[in-house]
Amino acid sequence: MSEKRSLVRMHNASATELGRVPTLPFPKFREAILNGVTNGMRVAALFGEAGESSSQVRLFVALADSVHGQLQLAQTLVEDDRFDSLTP
């Protein structure tokens, strides 16, 4: 399955259920962001929320695809207070 298909697609000003946003392992999450940017998308939002334990952070990304007028969403769970850089 390609990374584009592993992200949920939606249009701006629309809503989706949180359960539809795929949770990717961090390496796949990072890869999806880098592939998206390489293919002309931009990071419209990147934010986190506290996880279930004090050492967890759930990260969310929204990639904007202006060519197709879509947003692509994914999330990951970081188990530590640090993670690999999202930039090469």
Image (cartoon, rainbow, N blue to C red):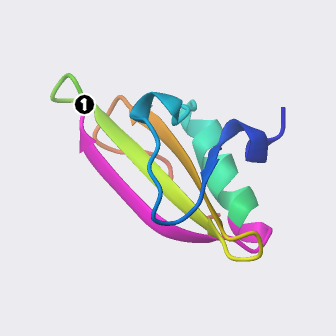
Bin the neighbour count of mark 1 within 10 Å (Cα to Cα): few under 14, some 14-19, many 20 and up. some
Q: Residue placed at 25% from the left, 30% from the top?
A: 51
Which quarter shows the N terminus? top right
- Quadrant in the rendering for residue 58: top left
Q: Residue placed at 62% from the left, 38% from the top?
A: 27
Q: Is residue 22 above or below residue 10?
A: above
Residue 16 located left or right of residue 57: right
Counting the numbered discs, the total is 1
Q: Is residue 71 above or below residue 48?
A: below
- Tell me if residue 68 is in the magenta stretch: no
Residue 55 location in percent, x, y? Answer: 22, 29
Q: Is residue 53 above or below residue 34?
A: above
Q: Residue placed at 76% from the left, 40% from the top?
A: 5
In this view, the residue in front, 79 or 77, is 77
Residue 80 located left or right of residue 39: left
Residue 25 location in percent, x, y? Answer: 57, 30
Residue 57 location in percent, x, y? Answer: 29, 38
Residue 30 located left or right of residue 34: left
Residue flagged by tag 1: what amino acid is it?
Answer: Gly
Q: The residue tagged with tag 1: helix, strand or loop?
A: loop
Residue 50 location in percent, x, y? Answer: 21, 38
In this view, the residue in front, 27 or 43, is 43
In this view, the residue in front, 83 or 14, is 14
Residue 14 located left or right of residue 32: left
Where does label 1 land, which residue? 51
In this view, the residue in front, 69 or 3, is 69
- Quadrant in the rendering for residue 77: top left
Residue interval drawn in magenta: 37-50
Q: Residue furthest left?
A: 54
